[in-house]
Amino acid sequence: MRLTQWTDYSLRVLMYCAACEHRDLPVTITEIADSHGISRSHLTKIVQQLGAKGLLQTTRGRGGGIRLCKPAAEINVGELVRQTETDFAMVECFDAQTNQCSLSPQCGLKGVLHQATNSYLAVLDGVTLADLIARPDVQAKGAMVEMPVSRKRDDG
Amino acid sequence: MRLTQWTDYSLRVLMYCAACEHRDLPVTITEIADSHGISRSHLTKIVQQLGAKGLLQTTRGRGGGIRLCKPAAEINVGELVRQTETDFAMVECFDAQTNQCSLSPQCGLKGVLHQATNSYLAVLDGVTLADLIARPDVQAKGAMVEMPVSRKRDDG
């Protein structure tokens, strides 16, 4: 059971921006690509989609980059994962068009898996992007790592 | 977010056997393969693994087939899914060897996703195989479908 790579990378882009929320210069795609070892073109698509969803704003040209559209404390993780994770069909029978399972009429599996998925998402509903980057246990140990502030200025 | 096909098919095999628990003749792999449109060789591997885990017993030859090793009411769905679903690495950073995420040291995502996954499995922990095939809402409407009892006698 895994979240898609799209969700994984979307979370990382937003968390990176959240961690740099109070920095003067906006974050660049190149900076995130270098930091995570993810291809720049793949990240560009993700940033575009997060922009279309009203989560990121992009400014072009020199000094441009990406920023969160609203404070990290107002971005709910459950809501975000529901948007990026388009397939919650846990097993074949969730899709009526492809379902070939002969047990379906008397089967309780679908209902139970729906309930389990809701329970999964309910945990994420209780968390914001700000919570994810503010781990008190790590901060308490002084292990907080500084976000990079230097960057190339060649992309937005 | 999906369970693997292996888990999906494992659940179907066990549910089919559970639904036929009180039948005189054991279930055959061919019967399940025909019923679900799944390849017989793929099902054979699943049956072998479920046998190795002590969930199914196989008898060979004429009149042979597969049966649950214990009553369906004693087979916990959460325990089963933990056994068949080997990958609960929700995102890249769950695997320390492949993790390239620079946010990891100050990131709370892993902990939150662990908590969500535990919440998912906790729902399944409250359900047995017998619960899955005894949907009171369906039975109440008289829509209960009979399990097939006829079958070829050429496999075990």
Image (cartoon, coloured by chain):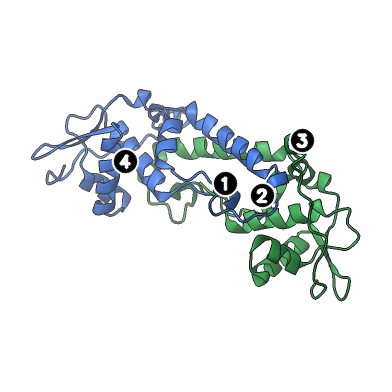
Chain colours: A green, B blue
Q: Is residue A121 visible?
A: no
Per the image, the residue denoted by label 2 is: A81
Question: Residue shown at 71%/39% (left/top)?
Answer: A125
Nearer the observer, B150 or B48: B48
Direction from residue A47 to residue B57 in the image, left or right: left
C-alpha distance separating marks 3 and 4: 46 Å
**Measured from the top left, where is residue A133 in percent x and y?**
76, 45
Per the image, the residue denoted by label 4 is: B13
Q: Is residue B84 visible?
A: yes
Figure check: A60 above or below B46: below
Per the image, the residue denoted by label 1 is: B94
Dot in front, 2 or 4: 2
Question: Mark 2 vs mark 3: same chain?
Answer: yes
Q: Amino acid at mark 1?
A: Phe
Dot in front, 4 or 1: 1
Q: Secondary structure at mark 3?
A: helix
Dot in front, 2 or 1: 1
Q: Earlier in the sequence, mark 4 or mark 1?
A: 4
Question: What's the mark number on residue A136?
Answer: 3
Q: Amino acid at mark 2?
A: Val
Figure check: B39 above or below A112: below
Q: Mark 4 Cα within 10 Å, few/some/many (few <14, many 20+)? A: many
Asked if the residue under mark 1 is in contact with the one under mark 4, i.e. CB atoms within 8 Å, the reply is: no
